[in-house]
Image (cartoon, grey):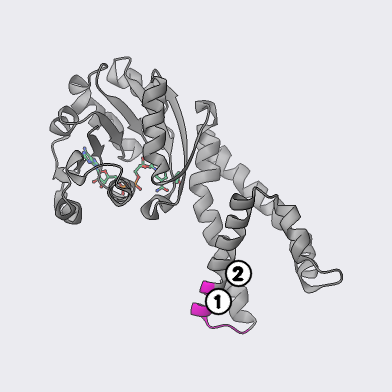
Amino acid sequence: MKIAILGGGNLGTAIAEGIINSGFCQAADITVTKRQTATLKHLADLGCNVYSDNVKAVKNSDIIILAVKPYNYQIVIDEVKAALNTKKHVLVSVITGVWINDLQKAIAKKLAVVRAMPNTAIAIQQSMTCIAAQDANHEQIEYIRNLFNQLGRTVVIDEQLMDAATVLGACGTAYAMRYIRANIQGGIEIGFDAKTASLIAAQTVLGAAELLIKTDSHPEKEIDKVTTPKGCTIAGLNEMEHQGFSSSLIQGINASYKKITK
Ligand SMILES: NC(=O)C1=CN([C@@H]2O[C@H](COP(=O)(O)OP(=O)(O)OC[C@H]3O[C@@H](n4cnc5c(N)ncnc54)[C@H](O)[C@@H]3O)[C@@H](O)[C@H]2O)C=CC1
Ligand SMILES: O=C(O)[C@@H]1CCC=N1
């Protein structure tokens, strides 16, 4: 299978790099497009095809990953729709807030369309990618899922949950960063230099996440292991809750969701 990535920006280039690093396919089988291709030199050096002709990229590929900003998708679809072939192509859109029906209407064909919602950790092959599909067969969905499995973990969801997936999975990277930053600020206040506090905070969060994923455990079970009776962990946790810690996170998630669905 040959893969075209239309829109070689942050996400598009990260996907290309991840696919090459994972060995999922040869660099020569990947095409990345952008209007000005100067910033894609590193991909060309790796062996990818890099150019600005979206139609040529579509004609030369089987899987078309659309990775432009939401306000640019219509222009790109108008440009390539005549070249899209329902018997050959699968369109994968990573665009926030654009529904499969919108894409199929814009294409004016019943093309197999898959929506994927990754996060920025895709750059280091640690994305959580939620996938939803329409008019794609089992084989096509499994191929796309396998592609994104090279770039982290995947889950197939109903498209109705795509906004929720965007909030929890993609905005979630920013929430986690803010949590880590707060830990760094607290860590400095209790004595660490910024660099050491950053390492301790980030590795501790990584370890906590891995504990949950690798042992299929529940957060509260792991908290029980850390909280010594009358100890400092429970004192800190309870104070955080008195200050509205869990409630503020839940309200933030709801605010993001309201914004994306309005
Ligand atoms: N940043 C994030 O955390 C996430 C972003 N997304 C979605 O992914 C999409 C891409 O996001 P980013 O990579 O962050 O944006 P970006 O702005 O870095 O990349 C978009 C690229 O498309 C190129 N482009 C614009 N018009 C084009 C055209 N006609 N032909 C070819 N290339 C064209 C731009 O030059 C730019 O390099 C967006 O729709 C966004 O909603 C999805 C999940 C997470
Ligand atoms: O903030 C946003 O609108 C997008 C959605 C997912 C990540 N960034």
Q: Is residue 181 visible?
A: no
Element on which disc 2 rests: helix
User: How far across and how far down the image is residue 199, in percent?
Assistant: 51, 73
Residues in magenta? Answer: 191-199
Element on which disc 1 rests: helix
Q: Amino acid at mark 2?
A: Asn
Q: Amino acid at mark 1?
A: Ala
- Quadrant where the N terminus is found in the figure: top left
Q: Quadrant of ligand 1?
A: top left
240 or 136: nearer the viewer: 136
Q: Quadrant of residue 186?
A: bottom right
How busy is the neighbourhood of tag 1: few (under 14 within 10 Å), some, or many (20 plus)?
Answer: many
Q: Earlier in the sequence, mark 1 or mark 2?
A: 2
Q: Is residue 255 left or right of residue 71?
A: right
The residue that appears at 26% across and 41% down in the rendered structure is: 25
Q: Quadrant of residue 142?
A: top left
Q: Mostly what secondary structure, the magenta segment?
A: helix
Answer above or below: position of 121 versus 80: below
User: How far across and how far down the image is residue 193, in percent?
Assistant: 53, 83
The residue that appears at 43% across and 25% down in the rendered structure is: 133
Within the magenta stretch, is there residue 76?
no
Give me the disc on residue 218.
none
The residue that appears at 19% across and 30% down in the rendered structure is: 58
60 or 225: nearer the viewer: 225
Answer above or below: position of 78 versus 126: above
Residue under numbered circle 2: 183
Q: Determine contact: label 1, label 2, CB under 8 Å.
A: yes
Residue under numbered circle 1: 197
Answer above or below: position of 162 versus 43: above
Q: Is residue 25 left or right of residue 193?
A: left
Q: Is residue 221 visible?
A: yes
